[in-house]
Image: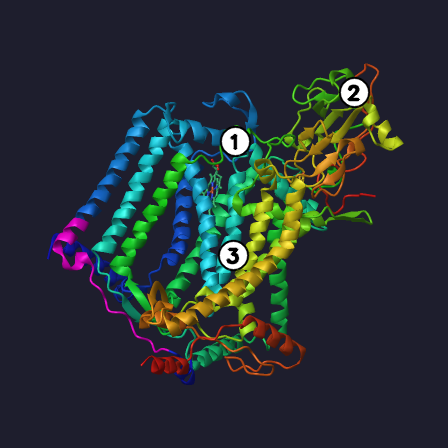
């Protein structure tokens, strides 16, 4: 036994004799993880969260979350002698007088953008492959909560430096709070400790930004990962992969090395961006002053779609009986986001209701094999994308020399017309992909090679698919639509009456499929070939 | 999937594909080469750290260099970052390469069980809960149940009450600014009173109400008091008699705080006489009392009535006759 083995054995034995963990650890270390590039998206989210914790902690060592007025004296000469909040002055101090401070600020901000982007793409993966289906609905809901918290956390983060751009963002947030019916102005006075901007806000959101929300997120991420662990990962369809097993690599050593290595890769890439790509140059904006503004005020992209909705809103307010209701703020700022996030959180259950399928699923869908869901996803993305584009309408107008009026009408009409269009087109595309799959399974793959038949006609050579490939294309099940009064896959009778009819109608529309080849068709073809 | 369903399946599961050996599994030379590659990657990481330390200690913080892609950039900051990026990135790449080429790549199979517990466990669980509840006897002792409900309901109030001192009540604050009848307009920045002649036709100026000596202007004040003065030719106004009387020799004054969400309405386009808010592009027509002609704002910018005092300085004729800034529930809009 080498010295190293002896130490390892000794440590293991020390721990086991005090915790009895050996049995559990053995099971854990050989736990199986399926491998696919899309499973790394969630890892990127987790790693950038860790990067945020590390870089953020570094920033707290110098950041002064105070709105006390100070006169700047430091290395950045253009602002010398200017009055500003201590928060802004300390962010300048971090940027110019602490070695590596600017790097850390930029790493922190880039990590936040990567965190949000990876979260969104991870969510898309989960959605389009149906990974949220039973038994994983809870994890989907945790995910929606994390996304929401991430948006808030990011907003509070870039509000902290108290520069002109971020102060403008806070002003807009204050207007949304103030617009809440009945209690709005009270809420605003409580949150800001009096009139906007007051002298309390930065110190309050600081506590929320570095403690409260990260703490909640950490707890949710832990629960999220424990569920992944306990329920075992989903896997893509393929030979040898069933609802009853999970095929992949053991945690120790392969998965550990890959995942651990991947953490350093993500950190390295974030550091590279922090080194070469300037982000949020607060010294250019100047300190916040409610009477001033920079042209082209834009939030970070994950808030941009909300801003785009606000910009597209028609100018409607109700004035009656001495009260004012700002629909132009409430609808885009609170009501639509509220509806979107609620529908998103409940989507797994909405889908169960549409299909009547309440069974467990561990093998993922290929997006084309669930045209309805894929189309719903494309519809939602289109809506968000049009909003996001409208959030940059001023930039679009100046860069492409368009009239802002045209862009606004494009967005207003687009927000209503394009999502349904995206739904229909996506569904058609899915169905034709299904048709192509069916052709491939029955008649083989087109090779692009032409041969001339004896009588002079050209035909393209079709190569039969390997049994593995053909299996992947046919392994999905095609659920029949619910009939009125029929029992669903769980044996629960579908109610009669209007509700039942509606549900059957929706189910029928949502279950449209190109039927995959049957074994009979396959046999007939085989007979024909011989 | 039920058995009968299975028969309809076109293809049966061919099972896991055969495991193919990698070059590094069968060829010791290839394995040796992979080992070398991994160690080169780790060495690159070490070099990155050395670069980091070098930049931290020896590259002065104000060294500017010219690099093709980056233009003029700060060398201290750049090499610090590149060193850190290298140090981290190559550890990761090395580990992944190691795992991919040299660690076992046998896929293994594990089995799942249904998440649902067995029926007898579920029944036992329900029985335990029922049993526990029965032992507590909450159902049999309504007095306890009700008083406990009362206590729990009330105890939830205290944390809410504790938040009360977060801030004062708005009272009438949002409806008031520091503008009073006779308040002088002073330049911002500069705090100098202005005469009409200081502003030429086509000009714009930002002003604040004059404060008595000793009173400090806070950001809260600026967030409510900021006013834009714009001077055009009087005949270009398209105002009713009252609003026209609020102007002075072609000078008109509006609250600078956007009636939409409170941004500073800072962009004045001289040729069209439009004021534009950069936040959501609400556009206001100066000649028509800041009527909204584009964007999500639902109300004109409040207009401040101005005139001159006996020394010839511009003053407010009266306070704003409506609340400035974004709307709120109790905003009395008549
Ligand atoms: C999910 C987590 C987080 C997100 C999305 C996030 C996002 C942000 C963003 C976008 C900024 C603005 C940076 C800039 O451009 O200046 C920021 C600032 C800041 N964050 Fe975070 N953050 C997170 C977690 C944390 C944590 C855990 C800490 C501390 C333990 C922290 C401490 C800070 C500090 C001190 C600042 C202000 C310093 C400065 O801007 O120079 N953050 N955050
Ligand atoms: S704040 Fe001015 S347009 Fe929205």
Residue A237 relative to residue A212: left or right = left
In the rendered image, residue A157 lying in the magenta stretch gets the answer no
Tell me the distance, in whole angstroms, between the alpha carbons under discs 1 and 2: 35 Å
Disc 2 designates what residue?
B314
Residue at the spot of label 1: A88
Q: Which residues lie in the magenta part? A: B11-34
B22 falls in the magenta region: yes
Q: Are marks 1 and 3 on the same chain?
A: yes
Residue A489 in sight: yes
Q: Nearer the viewer, residue B167 or B278?
A: B278
Residue A154 left/right relative to A5: right
Q: Are the residues flagged by discs 3 and 2 in contact, CB closer than 8 Å?
A: no
Q: Nearer the viewer, residue A507 or A105?
A: A507
Instruction: Write the residue at 50% across / 80% down.
Output: A490
Colouring used for the render: rainbow
Which image quadrant is residue B1 in?
Answer: bottom left
Circle number at residue A145: 3
Q: Helix, strand, or loop for circle 1?
A: helix
Which quarter of the figure is the N terminus of chain A placed in?
A: bottom left
């Amino acid at each position: 036994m080498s010295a190293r083995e002896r130490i390892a054995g000794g440590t293991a034995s020390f721990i086991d004799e005090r915790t009895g963990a050996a049995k559990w650890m053995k099971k854990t270390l050989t736990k199986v993880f399926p491998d696919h590039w899309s499973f790394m998206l969630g890892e990127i989210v987790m790693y950038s969260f860790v990067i945020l914790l590390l870089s953020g902690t570094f920033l707290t060592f110098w950041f002064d979350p105070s709105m006390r007025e100070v006169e700047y004296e430091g290395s950045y000469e253009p602002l010398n002698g200017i009055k500003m909040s201590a928060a802004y002055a300390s962010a300048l101090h971090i940027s110019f007088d602490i070695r590596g401070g600017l790097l850390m600020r930029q790493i922190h901000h880039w990590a936040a953008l990567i965190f949000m982007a990876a979260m969104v793409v991870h969510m898309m993966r989960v959605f389009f492959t149906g990974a949220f289906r039973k038994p994983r609905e809870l994890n989907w809901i945790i995910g929606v909560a994390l996304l929401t918290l991430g948006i808030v956390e990011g907003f509070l983060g870039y509000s902290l430096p108290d520069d002109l751009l971020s102060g403008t963002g806070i002003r807009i947030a204050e207007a949304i709070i103030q617009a809440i019916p009945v209690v709005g102005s009270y809420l605003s006075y409580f949150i800001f400790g009096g009139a906007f901007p007051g002298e309390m806000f930065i110190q309050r959101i600081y506590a929320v930004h570095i403690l409260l929300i990260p703490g909640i997120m950490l707890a949710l991420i832990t629960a999220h990962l424990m569920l992944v662990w306990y329920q075992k990962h989903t896997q893509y369809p393929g030979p040898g992969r069933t609802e009853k097993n999970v095929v992949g690599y053991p945690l120790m050593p392969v998965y550990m090395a890959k995942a651990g290595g991947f953490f350093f890769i993500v950190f390295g890439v974030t550091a590279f961006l922090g080194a070469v790509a300037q982000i949020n140059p607060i010294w250019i904006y100047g300190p916040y002053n409610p009477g001033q503004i920079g042209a082209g005020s834009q939030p970070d992209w994950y808030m941009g779609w909300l801003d785009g909705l606000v910009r597209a809103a028609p100018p409607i307010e109700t004035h009656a009986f001495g009260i004012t209701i700002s629909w132009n703020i409430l609808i885009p700022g609170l009501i639509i986001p509220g509806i979107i996030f609620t529908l998103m959180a409940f989507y797994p259950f909405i889908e169960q209701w549409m299909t009547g399928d309440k069974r467990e699923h561990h093998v993922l869908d290929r997006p084309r094999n669930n045209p309805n869901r894929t189309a719903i996803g494309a519809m939602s993305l289109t809506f968000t994308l049009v909003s996001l584009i409208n959030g940059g309408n001023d930039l679009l107008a100046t860069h492409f020399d368009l009239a802002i009026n045209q862009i606004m009408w494009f967005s207003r009409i687009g927000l209503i017309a394009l999502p349904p269009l995206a739904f229909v087109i996506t569904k058609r595309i899915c169905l034709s992909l299904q048709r192509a799959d069916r052709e491939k399974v029955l008649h083989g793959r087109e090779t692009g090679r032409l041969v001339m038949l004896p009588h002079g006609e050209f035909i393209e050579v079709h190569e039969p698919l390997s049994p593995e490939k053909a299996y992947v294309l046919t392994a999905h099940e095609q659920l029949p639509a619910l009939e009125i009064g029929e029992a669903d896959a769980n044996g629960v009778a579908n109610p009669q009456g209007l509700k039942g009819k509606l549900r059957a109608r929706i189910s029928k529309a949502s279950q449209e499929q190109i039927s995959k080849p049957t074994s009979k068709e396959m046999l007939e073809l085989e007979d024909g070939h011989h | 999937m039920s058995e009968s369903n299975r028969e309809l399946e076109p293809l049966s599961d061919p099972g896991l594909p055969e495991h193919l050996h990698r070059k590094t599994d069968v060829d010791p030379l290839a394995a040796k080469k992979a080992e070398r590659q991994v160690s080169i990657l780790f060495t690159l990481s070490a070099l990155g750290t050395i670069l980091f330390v070098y930049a931290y200690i020896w590259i002065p913080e104000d060294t500017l260099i010219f690099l093709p892609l980056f233009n003029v950039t700060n060398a201290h900051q750049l090499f610090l970052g590149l060193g850190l990026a290298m140090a981290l990135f190559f550890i990761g790449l090395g580990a992944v390469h190691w795992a991919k080429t040299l660690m076992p790549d046998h896929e293994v199979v594990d089995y799942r069980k249904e998440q649902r517990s067995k029926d007898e466990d579920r029944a036992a669980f329900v029985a335990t809960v029922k049993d526990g509840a029965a032992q507590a006897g909450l159902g049999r002792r309504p007095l306890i149940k009700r008083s406990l409900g009362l206590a729990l309901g009330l105890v939830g109030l205290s944390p809410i009450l504790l938040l009360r001192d977060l801030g004062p009540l708005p009272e009438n604050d949002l409806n008031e600014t520091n503008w009073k009848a006779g308040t002088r307009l002073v330049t911002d920045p500069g705090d100098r009173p202005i005469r009409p002649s200081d502003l030429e036709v086509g000009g714009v100026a930002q002003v604040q109400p004059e404060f008595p000596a000793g009173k400090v202007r806070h950001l809260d004040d600026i967030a409510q008091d900021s006013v834009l003065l714009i001077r055009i030719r009087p005949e270009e106004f398209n105002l009713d008699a009252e609003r026209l009387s609020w102007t002075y020799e072609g000078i008109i004054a509006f609250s600078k705080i956007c009636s939409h969400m409170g941004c500073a309405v800072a962009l004045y386009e001289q040729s069209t006489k439009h004021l534009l808010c950069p936040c959501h592009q609400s556009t206001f027509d100066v000649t028509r009392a800041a009527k909204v002609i584009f964007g999500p704002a639902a109300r004109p910018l409040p207009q401040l009535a101005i005139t001159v005092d006996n020394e010839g300085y511009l003053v407010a004729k009266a306070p704003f006759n409506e609340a400035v800034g974004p709307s709120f529930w109790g905003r009395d809009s008549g």
